[in-house]
Image (cartoon, rainbow, N blue to C red):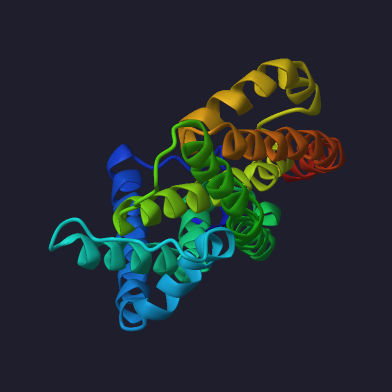
Amino acid sequence: MSQEHKTPEEYEAPITEHLAELRTRLFRSLVAIAIATVIVFTKVDFFFKIFKEPLNRVFPDLKLVALTPTESFFTAFKIAMLVGFVIASPYVFYQIWKFIEPALYEEEKKLVVPFVSFTTVFFISGALFAYFGVLPLAIKFLLTFGYTQLDVEAMISVSSYISFVVRLILAFGITFELPVILSLLARLGLVTPNALVKFRPYFVVAAFVMAAVLTPPDIVSQVFLAMPLIVFYEISIIMAKILYPRSERSKAEQT
């Protein structure tokens, strides 16, 4: 029986083969991100204006400053890498799928298009939610607190501001993948709806812990990250109840 037609139970590759496959998928993903990063870097001034827009909306007169000779260059490179990753994300998600594909049944392998589509859409949705919804509120809260409570004037370095924006966008983009991941695991029969329901109280606590770790240290961005996580978890439970029986039936048909 060829590798393409083996079931997950029949297909067992040595660890060296898994590592070689992982290396190949990582290399292809990194090449795609690098190419996209170089392309974006040629127009990084355009994207910098987009990144600076949430700050301009709240504090139009506030200027960003560069504190070291190399700060502007590395900040531009950081912007290019984030935008490059977003552009290359469909291909990266496809490489992730190809890595796990040998462990799937033939029927499950057909989910590649929904997986790549939904992971891309949810990642970009999270990034847009952070950009349009969370960033202006977080910036206004943090800087207003400094003005009123400490009586200080804000002088923000361009590197610290862009790092703040990048961290927030990545945090929301990654965590918005939760429904896709849990739905896929349910579809593959790796998690059950009952297990997700039982884990709900622990996840609520974990959501706020993850928000505290992934976002900058302000209550606004942490709450705005934790609440969608909790909502998405509830959606994932509903999706698991729909998808899990189908997964079980498909496995039964393959045996």
Can residue 2 be seen in the rendering of this structure?
no
Front-most of residues 126 and 145: 145
Q: How many marks?
A: 0
Q: Is residue 178 above or below residue 79?
A: above
- Quadrant housing residue 240: top right
Q: Is residue 152 left or right of residue 201?
A: left
What is the quadrant of residue 113 in the picture? bottom right
Asked if residue 245 can be seen in this view, the reply is yes
Residue 85 percent location from the top left of the image: 42, 64
Position of residue 201 relative to residue 154, above or below, is above
In the displayed structure, would residue 14 be above or below residue 120? above
The furthest residue to the left: 69
Q: Nearer the viewer, residue 163 or 96?
A: 163
Q: Quadrant of the C terminus?
A: top right
The residue closer to the viewer here, 28 or 253, is: 28
User: Which residue is rendered at x = 35% and y = 61% of the image?
Assistant: 64
Residue for point 32% across, 38% down = 15
Q: Left or right of 206: which side holds 232? A: right
Residue 216 locus on image (x, y percent)? 46, 38
* Image location of residue 45, percent across then percent down: 36, 78
Q: Residue at horizontal 60%, vertical 22%?
A: 206
Task: Identify the residue at image location x=41%, y=71%.
Answer: 48
Q: Position of residue 30 (x, y in %)?
A: 32, 62
